[in-house]
Image: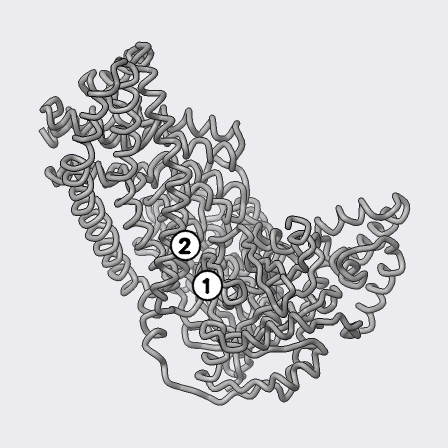
């Protein structure tokens, strides 16, 4: 079986972001992978398989790429697949509306000697815009199979399957560029002796453009002497042409494309502006965009996640289902059957696996995180995020980030751990470090946010102080980081995909996928945390740790009992907040203390899971520095806020 | 035309910036870092370009043109050092200050034409138009300007890309931003949004400044 699997011919899907690659993937495999309307949320490669005429094919969906010469991490991942795999066919999916802009990559793929099938997708929208495309002529011009499609409705799927099954590699005739460029390419080709996945012509062009991966590949494959003379020749060419090189190659390719598209595309003028365009303009205009953002935050986050998720659903699950129906039988069962005290404590005690681990995860965190992911997926599929990104870009530049970073920041309000993972889509290391740090310090995750909002909502003034103070820390620390950290300031550029009506099925499956991965990754940590706390309680270590923290807690004006909450906070951000909840209900905290405690806890160290991801993504050194900084920052901010509240008498 | 010392030119420049562009009435001697008997100030007073009353210096009507042209030379020099020579930050400012004093006897006109009669300096302050700019406008030269100079709703054909490094160049090219392509600028704030064909892109002003477009001849 496994042998057969390995021998299945591979079919690789490539193309720009937002052209419906994942839709093609799903149509071919029948499986579901996340369809992302935001460039950069899927760095992973999805694999599936399909059977056509009794032959099994492995299908690979790659992250979006704009050209054969990668700039971002996602593009590098996609290109690596083309360099390393040996595909039976490469399906290049393009958006019919932008055929002129996307065809140059088709040329590059053909030029690389890859077995290309071109899928011209989203034909329906193109027709609506008044475009007519003669696909037969295009197929004749390009010399590869060309298939017109509306994959969303599976139009063109049968033809595509047929084309995959029938694919037979034919030697291609290279497109000819300007004479001087050809001379340089020929010069390099003559020096290449090794065998490469990509054609020598493509390898030579990429070498000319100083592509790192290609240079490394050549170093491995060529003899030392050949490698040296290749490098020397490439250096000579790139010096002679300087910055014009990339441009000339692009211009030559466009010239070829124009030739390919002569008489293929006819465009009628179409003047009406659809509603989606209008809405899109409103979203991008700061005057109308800000109220829209506030509406989204109010209804999406406050009302739906805060009100419905953290309120109604938690009350129902925690207060009704668990309290009345699940916990009593479980506890009475334990009381009857578990004689050993330590075992009783481990399972259903104060920090027990059941009482603290499972109940928390299912009844408290899941509804909050679930509703958040639903809102997030919904917004993601409409294409709202790129519009938000361009709206905040100027402000984000002040804290050393580009507008692109708004996505991980928003995701952080759902789960900081996932958001830290997503920071890898940011372009520079500097941006990634700043974003990771701000996520660890300022952004509360939905679980924590839910509990804190619940705590403070009775005291609107406390909520206001909390919000303003966190916002200040975000801006001050961000702009300090932007000044202190070395490196160039980020450059912002982003494609703004058309607004779309989200498809409910996609949104639902996306939400479920996110919740599932949250559960699979977080639940074990919940259980682990419960065991650690239980062990700590049984051995008395917990007491000792709490005693160490106690003086610090006292210094920021809180009762010693609050120490427990801070120690718990490391295991789960929301544990800490929930600890505060107990304190408040037993009347140990006044309003000022509650505010100080809430601020300090929000800023305080990320949870175990986030810390582990920080180590994985940023390296142990950076992670530890951030950890130490965040701890110091949290308590000094708490101390500072306490002093302010004490001297001014606010919230007294 | 009279030639003033570099220090005198600096005074004229500050006066223009503070009193004509800003809302100050006259300029404190201390903020100009001069005393009533400084040589450069006397120079200007003798030409009746400025007058000193109390502890303030005032720009006289007679001196306005010269002051304006000094500011113009300074900002043109900034465009030269920052855009063309690619010297940024404090270093760029210093170099611009050194260059501006060399831009006389028609050199400023040549530079202005080379830079295609820019209307703002890299900091966004207006460059007072010289005769060459007015002439060029009257002739209706299509003119090549940075994307940042277009009004929203205006379109143009990309003339050239002035990207300072390969990565930025690649980014622009990957968006289909290539010489000869028609773009429509749809929004300028908070980010620049433009359309290429049926796709829409947003860029910040760093990138937008590197895209140079030819305005359509009307």
Provide the chain ID for the residue under circle 1: B
Q: Residue furthest front?
A: A337
Q: Residue at x 16, y 26 (%)?
A: A582
Q: Residue at x 19, y 32 (%)?
A: A327
- Return the residue nearer the eye: A507 or A332: A332
Residue pictured at 30% horizontal, 20% vertical:
A346
Task: Determine the image quadrant of residue A101.
Answer: bottom right
Q: Which mark is residue A249?
A: none
A393 w.r.t. B218: above or below: above
Place residue A87 in its image quadrant. bottom right
Label 2 Cα neighbours within 10 Å, binned few <14 / some 14-19 / many ≥20: many
Q: Is residue A548 left or right of residue A319?
A: right
The Cα–Cα distance between marks 2 and 1, rounded to whole angstroms, is 10 Å
Question: What is the number of the mark on residue B202?
Answer: 1
Q: Residue at x 68, y 50 (%)?
A: A3
Q: Residue B194, image x and y in percent?
A: 47, 70
Decide: few, some or many residues near mark 1? Use Cα within 10 Å; few <14, some 14-19, many ≥20. many
Viewer-closest of A194 and B90: A194
Q: Are marks 2 and 1 in contact (CB under 8 Å)?
A: yes
Q: Chain of mark 2?
A: A
Helix or strand or loop: what does disc 1 sit on? Answer: strand
Q: Residue A393's mark?
A: 2
Q: Are marks 2 and 1 on the same chain?
A: no
Residue A318, position as x, y percentages in the image: 19, 38
Q: To which quarter of the image does residue A634 belong?
A: top left
Residue A334 position, x and y percent, is: 23, 23
Residue A293, image x and y in percent? Answer: 28, 58
Q: Quadrant of the N terminus of chain B?
A: bottom right
Figure label count: 2
Residue B177 visible here: yes
Q: Is residue B30 visible?
A: no
Q: Is residue A584 left or right of residue A531?
A: left
């Amino acid at each position: 079986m496994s042998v057969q699997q390995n021998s299945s011919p591979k079919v690789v899907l490539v193309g720009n972001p937002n052209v419906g690659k994942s839709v093609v993937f799903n149509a071919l495999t029948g499986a579901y992978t996340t369809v992302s309307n935001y460039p950069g949320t899927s760095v992973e490669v999805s694999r599936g398989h399909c059977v056509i005429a009794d032959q099994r094919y492995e299908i690979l969906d790659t992250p979006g790429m704009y050209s054969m010469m990668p700039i971002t991490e996602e593009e590098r991942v996609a290109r690596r697949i083309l360099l390393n795999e040996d595909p039976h066919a490469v399906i290049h999916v393009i958006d019919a509306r932008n055929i002129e802009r996307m065809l140059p990559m088709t040329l590059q793929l053909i030029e690389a000697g890859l077995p290309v099938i071109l899928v011209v997708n989203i034909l329906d929208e193109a027709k609506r815009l008044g475009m007519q495309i003669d696909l037969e002529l295009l197929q004749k011009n390009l010399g590869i199979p060309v298939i017109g499609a509306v994959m969303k409705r599976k139009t063109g799927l049968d033809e595509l399957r047929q084309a995959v099954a029938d694919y037979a590699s034919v030697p291609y005739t290279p497109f000819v560029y300007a004479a001087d460029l050809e001379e340089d390419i020929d010069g390099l080709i003559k020096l290449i002796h090794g065998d490469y996945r990509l054609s020598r012509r493509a390898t030579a062009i990429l070498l000319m453009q100083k592509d790192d991966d290609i240079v490394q590949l050549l170093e491995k494959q060529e003899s030392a002497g050949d490698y040296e003379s290749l490098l020397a020749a490439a250096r000579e060419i790139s010096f002679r042409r300087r910055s014009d090189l990339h441009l000339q190659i692009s211009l030559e390719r466009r010239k070829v494309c124009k030739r390919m598209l002569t008489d293929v595309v006819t465009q009628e003028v179409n003047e009406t502006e659809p509603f989606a365009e209008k809405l899109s303009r409103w979203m991008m205009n700061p005057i109308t965009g800000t109220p829209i953002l506030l509406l989204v935050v109010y209804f999406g986050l406050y009302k739906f996640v805060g009100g419905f998720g953290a309120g109604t659903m938690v009350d129902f699950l925690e207060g009704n289902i668990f309290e009345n129906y699940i916990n009593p039988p479980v506890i009475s069962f334990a009381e009857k059957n578990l004689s050993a005290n330590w075992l009783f404590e481990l399972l259903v005690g104060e920090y027990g696996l059941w009482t603290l681990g499972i109940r928390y995860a299912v009844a408290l965190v899941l509804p909050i995180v679930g509703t958040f992911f639903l809102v997030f997926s919904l917004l993601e599929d409409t294409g709202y995020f790129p519009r938000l990104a361009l709206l905040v870009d100027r402000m984000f530049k002040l804290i050393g980030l580009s507008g692109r970073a708004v996505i991980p920041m928003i995701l952080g309000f759902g789960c900081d751990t996932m958001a830290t993972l997503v920071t890898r889509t940011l372009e520079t290391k500097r941006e990634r470090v700043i974003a990771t740090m701000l996520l660890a310090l300022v952004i509360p995750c939905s679980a924590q946010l839910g509990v804190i909002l619940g705590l403070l909502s009775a005291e609107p003034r406390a909520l206001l102080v909390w919000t303003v103070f966190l916002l200040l820390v975000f801006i001050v620390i961000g702009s300090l980081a932007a000044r202190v950290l070395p490196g160039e300031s980020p450059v912002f550029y982003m494609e703004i995909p058309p607004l779309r009506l989200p498809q409910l099925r996609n949104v639902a499956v996306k939400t479920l996928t996110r919740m599932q991965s949250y559960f699979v990754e977080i639940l074990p940590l919940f259980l682990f945390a419960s065991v650690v706390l239980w062990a700590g309680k049984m051995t008395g270590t917990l007491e000792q740790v709490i005693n160490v923290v106690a003086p610090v807690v006292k210094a920021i004006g809180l009762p010693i009992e609050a120490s427990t909450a801070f120690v718990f906070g490391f295991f789960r951000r929301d544990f800490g907040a929930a600890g505060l909840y107990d304190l408040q209900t037993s009347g140990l905290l006044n309003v000022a203390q509650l505010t100080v405690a809430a601020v300090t806890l929000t800023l305080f160290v990320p949870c175990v899971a986030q810390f582990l991801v920080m180590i994985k993504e940023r390296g142990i050194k950076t992670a530890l520095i951030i950890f130490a900084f965040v701890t110091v920052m949290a308590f000094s901010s708490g101390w500072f806020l306490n002093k302010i509240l004490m001297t001014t008498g606010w919230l007294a | 035309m009279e030639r003033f010392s570099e220090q005198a030119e600096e005074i004229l420049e500050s006066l223009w910036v503070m009193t004509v562009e800003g809302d100050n009435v006259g300029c404190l001697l201390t903020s100009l870092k001069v005393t009533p008997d400084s040589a450069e100030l006397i120079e200007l007073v003798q030409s009746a370009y400025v007058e000193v009353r109390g502890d303030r210096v005032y720009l006289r009507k007679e001196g306005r043109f010269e002051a304006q042209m000094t500011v113009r030379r300074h900002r043109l020099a900034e465009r030269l050092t920052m855009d063309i020579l690619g010297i940024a930050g404090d270093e760029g400012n210093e170099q611009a200050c050194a260059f501006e004093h060399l831009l006389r006897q028609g050199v400023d006109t040549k530079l202005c034409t080379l830079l295609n009669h820019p209307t703002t300096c890299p900091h966004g302050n207006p460059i007072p138009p010289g005769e060459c700019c007015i002439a060029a406008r009257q002739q209706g030269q299509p003119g090549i300007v940075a994307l940042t100079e277009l009004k929203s709703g205006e379109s143009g054909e990309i003339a050239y890309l002035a990207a300072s490094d390969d990565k930025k160049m690649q980014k622009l090219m990957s968006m289909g931003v290539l010489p000869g392509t028609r773009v429509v600028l749809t929004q300028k704030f908070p980010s620049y949004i433009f359309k290429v064909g049926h796709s829409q892109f947003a860029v910040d002003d760093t990138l937008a400044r590197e895209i140079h477009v030819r305005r359509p001849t009307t």
